[in-house]
Amino acid sequence: MEWWSVHRSSYPLLWKVARDVLPAQASSVPCERVFSASKQTTTAQRNALRPELVEKLQILKFGLKQCDLDFTGGWIEPLEEMPGATDNGNEDF
């Protein structure tokens, strides 16, 4: 890609093609991982899921695995804000 970036003005059309083709994955492993992950989602009990829903579930599952999503992070209330909490950090129940 560096060579094509340097010579992009000499070969503008070939540079566009190289930019689109060279970064492509040379392995099918990422694709196979997607199919394996979707197999866990679309089990025999869930065989009636619409493709759009399966896609959304896969995106959510990927986000959770990458720790990009946190659905419970805001649920835990700090001790100071809990009803009946005292100054020394002990609860007054």
Image (cartoon, helix red, strand yellow):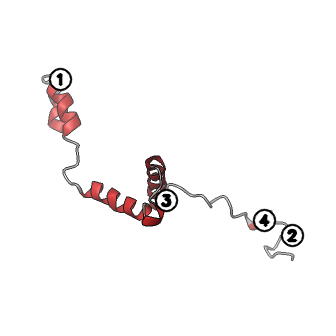
Measured Cα–Cα span from mark 4 to mark 2: 9 Å
Q: Amino acid at mark 2?
A: Gly
Which residue position is annotated with label 3?
64
| Image mark for residue 12 | 1
**Which of the two marks, 4 or 3, is nearer to us in this view?**
3
* 72 on left or right of 53: right
Measured Cα–Cα span from mark 2 to mark 1: 70 Å
* Residue 32 locus on image (x, y percent): 28, 58
Measured Cα–Cα span from mark 1 to mark 4: 63 Å
Measured Cα–Cα span from mark 3 to mark 1: 41 Å
Mark 3 and mark 1 lie on one chain; the one further toward the N terminus is 1
Q: Amino acid at mark 4?
A: Glu
**Which of the two marks, 1 or 4, is nearer to us in this view?**
1
Q: Amino acid at mark 1?
A: Pro
- Residue at 79 percent of width and 62 percent of height: 81
* Residue 48 locus on image (x, y percent): 47, 56
Q: Amino acid at mark 3?
A: Leu
Mark 4 and mark 3 lie on one chain; the one further toward the N terminus is 3
| Image mark for residue 80 | 4
Q: Secondary structure at mark 1?
A: helix
Q: Which image quadrant: the N terminus?
A: top left
* 69 on left or right of 40: right
Q: Secondary structure at mark 4?
A: helix
Which residue position is annotated with label 2?
84
